[in-house]
Amino acid sequence: MTTTLLDRARSLFGPIDELASSTAPGEPVADEALRLLAESGLRGLLVPKAAGGLELPLVEVVDLYEEVSRADGSTGWVFFASDACASYFGAYLPDDGMEDLFGGGVPLVAGQFTPNGTARVDGDDLWIDGDYQFGSGIVHATWAGGGVMTVPGEGGTPEYLGVCFPRDAVEIEGNWDVLGLQATASYDYRLREVRIPRSHAFDFLAPTVHRGSAVYSLGAITLTALGHAAWALGVTRRVLDELAGMAAGTTRVGASSSLATTAVGLTLFAWGGAMGRPAPDATAFVHRDASWLSVVGTSWGLDDPQELIDENLQWVGQFYDALGPYATDQSYQNFADPALENWQTAYYGTNLPRLVEVKRAYDPENVFTFPQGIPLQV
């Protein structure tokens, strides 16, 4: 790098966060946020170099989408969505169409590419009609896109195309009354009898890659999924950052240190479903009836004082006891508990006698052993 680009993205955390905080509920992402990203060289990350973009390796694109999304989820969503849309047109449009869109630099693009529109063929032009949703960032865009099915002549076969048109050609209808990602302004939009040249269209499911590397052969859906994954990473990191900040300022009743410095916690794993279909005695794994696995744990460093260690262990014991009325008497052996009473039954249940038989047959010398391992006799 792109270390430089990543550093620039990180340096924008404060300004983007502040702009997001000052954006009124229901208002779009601030223009200033997108301007800051562009001025920092963070536009066209996924766009082919031949179209004026950066064409970064996918891993670096993910890192940058993630970092912007960590600063603000709505800004990150609009950022990656516009970049992904621009990458389609930069890679898949023929030269004339690419020049129309990218002649003045990498544009801001928005659109939904589900085939919710039709295209009537008129020589070298297409007449577009369509009703679309989820036009994330469309209020900022200079170009918009959509998915259409062509209206073939008699005996013809319809084509699924991705098309683009000036943003001014669409009617924005609103309809974005949501709890989260309000500022993406992912409005509905419509077109009626909008004429575009065929050079502004590409085969959506099997596009021809006119420029850029083999990466663009992945297609529009996969390139979009890349952005979704990176966005999820970014907002999840932000959640963890916020939780860490809250933990640093929160102290349990009677504790001598904050939650941030007390390494205790509860983890829940969703079980049930397919893993619950076999009978408990069908395999060595007996815990087929549980819907959830709860893990209460703690950790400490070599230099931590004994007072903190004792405090953590006390918390784990108290929490474990509090969960008791809501849990079975079984325990998952992959999370061994040295203090567990009746561990043989808790770990292995009614399967223990059969497991002992297997142990005797294949490890009669008890080579594979630990204090809570399967014994040679019940």
Image (cartoon, rainbow, N blue to C red):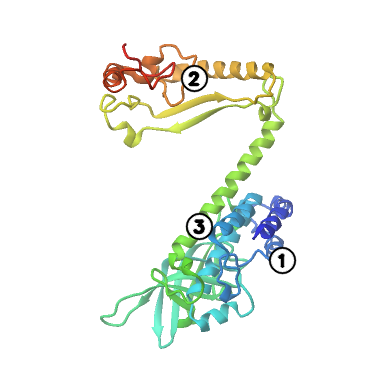
Please give left or right for residue 362 compared with residue 367 in the image. left
Return the disc, 1 or 2, that comes first in the chain's sequence.
1
x then y, percent, for residue 254: 69, 17
Report how far apart the C-alphas of labels 2 and 3 lie in the structure.
40 Å
Q: Quadrant of the C terminus?
A: top left
Location of residue 302 by image quarter: top right
Return the disc, 1 or 3, that comes first in the chain's sequence. 1
Which residue is tagged 2? 323
Is residue 271 visible to the viewer in this orientation of the structure?
Answer: yes
Quick one: 205 or 50, which is closer to the camera?
A: 50
For label 1, the SS is: helix
Q: Earlier in the sequence, mark 2 or mark 3?
A: 3
Task: Write down the residue under mark 1.
Answer: 39
Amino acid beneath label 2: Leu
Residue under pointer 3: 226
Amino acid found under the numbered disc labelled 3: Leu
- In space, the residues marked 1 and 2 are separated at their CA atoms by 53 Å
Q: Quadrant of residue 61?
A: bottom right
Residue at 55 percent of width and 62 percent of height = 57
The answer to whether 342 appears left or right of 12 in the picture is: left
Please name which of the two marks, 1 or 2, marks the residue nearer to the observer.
1
Decide: marks 1, 2 in contact (CB < 8 A)?
no
* Residue 172 spot, x, y in % from top left: 56, 67
Between 228 and 147, the residue placed more toward the observer is 228
Packing grade of label 1 (10 A; few <14, some 14-19, many >=20) is few
Q: How far across and how far down the image is residue 195, in percent?
A: 48, 82
User: Secondary structure beneath disc 2?
Assistant: helix
Label 3 near label 1: C-beta < 8 Å?
no
Q: Secondary structure at mark 3?
A: helix
